[in-house]
Amino acid sequence: MHIPDGYLGPATCGFFYVAMAPIWAFASRIVKKTLSAKQVPLLAIGAAFSFVIMMFNVPIPGGTTGHAVGGVLVAILLGPWAACIAITVALVVQALLFGDGGITAIGANCFNMAFVLPFLGYYIYKAISYGSAVDSNRRVIAAGVAGYVALNLAAALTGFEFGIQPLLHKTASGQALYCPYGLNVALPAMIGEHALVFGWVEAIVTALVIKYLQKQAPELLEEGKV
Amino acid sequence: MRRNNFVERSLTGAISFLKDSVFADEYASAKGFLQSLDPRIKAFTFVLFVVTAILAKSAVICLILYSLCLALACLSGIHMGFFLKRTWIFIPIFSLFIAIPALFSIFTPGEAIFTMDVAGLKFIITRQGLSGAVLFVSRVVTAVSFVVLLSITTRHFALLKVLRVFGVPQIFVMTLGMCYRYIYLFLEIIQNTYLAIKSRVGTSLGYKKGQHIVAWNMSSLWQRSYYLNEEVYLAMLSRGYTGEPKLSEDLKSGARDWAWLIFSVAVSAFLLMAAGRGTV
């Protein structure tokens, strides 16, 4: 789901940088106000955690592996605003130091994976698990559903961003300048693979991690997120 | 039930990631043209080249920029085999595959330049499809190559500091620097855990058992990370942290850096103007 440089045109890249700017500013303000000085390293630790989550190979039926994005998990653990900053930092490190995801597409990647994914996932999790005890099964189910739904929506958004490129950028002779496939191809391709494979990986990983934390360290699932 | 070698894959992934970073650091500390430039100016000019590639509407511009990128890699003592492997795998090759269907009239209608019959079905490659695919792949490989070249010829800490030039708030830059250190610590933890799993239960596990192992690893990593927070804060206090992040500004620029900046801006402006006039 990391969009590389060259897939999105300048208008789309610019739009998402502009859209993310107030979100980043607001997130920094909220986090600065809410986090105590003692918790400052937690942001960096959360960012490193969201970076390495993507490096875990999760076994799937058929002998192959996939990997989770972990956006909803980080949001459940840190709160959505802190998750927004942590995932942004992880995406910047990936793009700048390891060439994974484009520099010009950082705005779009952050909108999909550091804003839509954690916020949607977090509020779905909160809605389903509302009023439940920290160790209840409802929280495990809520985490799985939130992971699945939020990842699929983020993937659909990515497909939409790819799909509008031929509409926005085309030469007079009909040659595509950026991602060559329209909405009729890009949307089903992105939704299909995530609905069938990666969404389930995300759901299983998010649910199982919450289940383990319920047993091992329930205090980490208590309220007080940013 | 088919067995899954996810333990081996995770180990290979973590080890190759660490190995690549060591290689990158070796290149960043070697003597060469790009290594001698001020990271701030180098980063600015490389972003400018990437933006020029994104704005280009002709594959010729992307190929000129790509040639410049390869020449810079040579001047900086980067081993070409390592550089091409690092840049073409995975994104440009993946882009090449996804560009192939766009060659055909079913996705890109236009002037036919090649027609083939396969099992009674007519496949037409169009001029618009071919030029679109060439532009797409050349733009992707050019952008990826510049970013990788920047990353392997600059010390990673200096590169993160450079973000201040682009107006990134200090709290983000400080978090980035700290995050970068933890990534290596966490990768080492993961590597050791998977080695322990490999030595105790082997690499061949069913996928359900495997998923539980991965989830257990993630949750225990989070637990360890969370408790690490307090120790890190105490270490920061002992080094004089007062609640406000401060970054040392030890980057310097000289005449060579300014000459490179002028050259890069001129190249980008010339290419974009030439493209605007339809010369390339």
Image: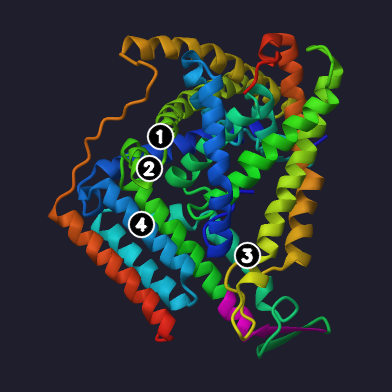
Label 1–label 4 contact, CB within 8 A: no
Badge 2: few (under 14), some or many (20 or more) residues near its Cα, within 10 Å? some
The answer to whether mark 1 and mark 2 are in CB contact below 8 A is yes
Q: Which residues are magenta?
A: B121-132
- Is residue A130 left or right of A175 when viewed as pictured? right
Q: Residues within 10 Å of mark 1 (few under 14, many from 20)?
A: many
Does residue B82 show up? no
What label does residue B173 carry, if any?
1
For mark 3, name the chain. B
Nearest to N terminus: mark 4 or mark 2: 4
Same subunit under labels 4 and 2? yes
Chain of the residue under the numbered disc 4 shown in the image: B
Chain for disc number 1: B
Residue drawn at (29%, 60%), measured in percent from left and top? Answer: B72
Q: The residue under label 1 is which amino acid type?
A: Val
**Labels 3 and 2 touching (C-beta < 8 A):** no
Q: Do the dots labelled 1 and 2 sit on one chain? A: yes
Q: What residue does disc 2 label?
A: B163
Q: In the rendered image, which quarter is residue A200 located in?
A: top right
Residue beneath disc 3: B97
In the image, is B148 to the left or to the right of A34? left
Residue B11 percent coordinates (x, y): 55, 31
Task: Determine whether, in the image, residue B69 is placed left or right of residue B187.
Answer: left
Q: Are marks 3 and 1 on the same chain?
A: yes
Tell me if label 4 and label 3 are in contact, CB under 8 Å. Answer: no
Against B113, residue B95 (above or below) is above
What is the tally of numbered marks visible in this picture? Answer: 4
- Look at discs 3 and 1 and give the one toward the viewer: 1
